[in-house]
Every structure is written in C-alpha cells, then in structure tokens.
Image: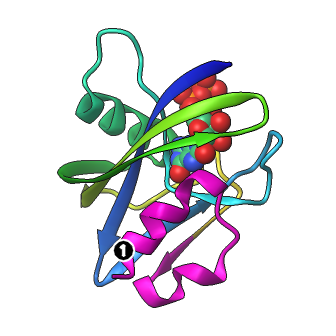
Amino acid sequence: MKTIEVVAAVIYNNGTYLATQKGDGPFRGQWEFPGGKIEIGETKQEALIREIKEELSLTIEVEKWICTTEYDYPTFHITMHSYLCRMIEGKPILNEHQALKWLPAKDLNNLKWLPADIKTVRLLQE
Ligand SMILES: Nc1nc2c([nH]c(=O)n2[C@@H]2O[C@H](COP(=O)(O)OP(=O)(O)OP(=O)(O)O)[C@@H](O)[C@H]2O)c(=O)[nH]1
C-alpha cells in the first residue's frame, strides 16, 4: 500500500484551536487540521509553514511536536505529524477549505474528524 507523510498544524489563538473542513475529495465535509504532504528536500517545519500559507494565507510559528500517528485508510497508509503552532500574522482565508472553526479543546469532539486525527484531538483534551 502507498504511504504518504503529512504534517498537520494545530494552530491556537486565544484559548481556541483552528479546525478546517475539507471542501473536496473523498473526505469532503470532514474536519482536519490544515497541512499536507511533505515535499522532497523540505523539513517538517518548512512544509507546515508553506502549507498554511497556501491553504489559509496565514503565517505561523511551529512551537512543538504533539504526536505522530500511523493510520491505514482503505487505499493508502498515512504517517501524520501534528505540531502545535502559533499564529503570527494574518487572518485565515479559505483558499482550499469550505469552512473553519476556532474551538476550545472541550468542543473539538463535536466535529466529525478524519480518522487519522482522533489521537491528536484526544491529546489536546487531556
Ligand atoms: N492536512 C491534513 N491532511 C490530513 C489530516 N488527516 C488526514 O487523514 N489527512 C490526509 O492526509 C492527506 C493530505 O494530503 P493533502 O491533499 O492535504 O496534501 P497536499 O496539500 O500536499 O496535497 P496535493 O498533493 O493534493 O497538493 C489527505 O489524504 C488527507 O485526507 C489532517 O489533519 N490534515
């Protein structure tokens, strides 16, 4: 099975975390942490900063690693690295997603997350 390596940004601001809703593809309508695949020659931090600029026109600072999750989807395996990130400039703009929400940790459970994200959400709630 194909493996993809992805970075996800858990962006916090004023006691809330940013969740984004996928706008297309097989997981349309489900929620994720913004991010994407690491490109060749890039560090995880560089990939995160690039993806968040592309997807949300936002400048972030990567603060700390949260967890790495391995998950088998029916057609691929994902290795996903989640990082806590701080917003340093801009206001999120939906360049790719259909919606976003800023939520306190206790409310993150109300969303339908991509299966690979469940562990990250649980850790934020501990
Ligand atoms: N960004 C992101 N992707 C996730 C999360 N959880 C999860 O399963 N994924 C999966 O990881 C993959 C990320 O690919 P992507 O399509 O967002 O990455 P990308 O922007 O580099 O893609 P591209 O090749 O279409 O340009 C998708 O299959 C997505 O469904 C998450 O929390 N954030």
Q: Residue furthest top?
A: 41
Relative to residue 104, is residue 98 drawn left or right? right
Instruction: Assign the C terminus to one quadrant of the image.
Output: bottom left
Instruction: Assign the N terminus to one quadrant of the image.
Output: top right
The residue depicted at 38 percent of the width and 51 percent of the height is: 9
The residue depicted at 41 percent of the width and 24 percent of the height is: 38
Q: Position of residue 74 (x, y in %)?
A: 78, 36
**In this picture, is 119 found above or below 61?**
below
SS category of the residue bearing label 1: helix
Q: Is residue 59 magenta?
A: no
Per the picture, the main secondary structure of the magenta-coloured stretch is: helix
Asked whether residue 104 appears in the rendered view, the answer is no
Q: Position of residue 125 (x, y in %)?
A: 39, 81
Q: Is residue 111 magenta?
A: yes
The residue depicted at 19 percent of the width and 50 percent of the height is: 61
Q: Position of residue 81 (x, y in %)?
A: 37, 42
Quadrant in which ligand 1 is drawn: top right
Q: Quadrant of residue 117?
A: bottom right
Across the whole image, how many numbered discs are drawn on residues? 1
- Residue span colored magenta: 101-126
Queried on whether the Cβ of the residue with tag 1 lies below 8 angstroms from ligand 1, the answer reads: no
Relative to residue 81, is residue 102 drawn left or right? right
Type of residue at label 1? Leu
The residue depicted at 29 percent of the width and 10 percent of the height is: 41
Q: Position of residue 57 (x, y in %)?
A: 43, 46
Q: How is the image coloured?
A: rainbow
Q: Nearer the viewer, residue 69 or 85?
A: 69
Q: Which residue is mark 1?
A: 124
Relative to residue 47, is residue 2 drawn left or right? right
**In this picture, is 70 found above or below 3?**
below
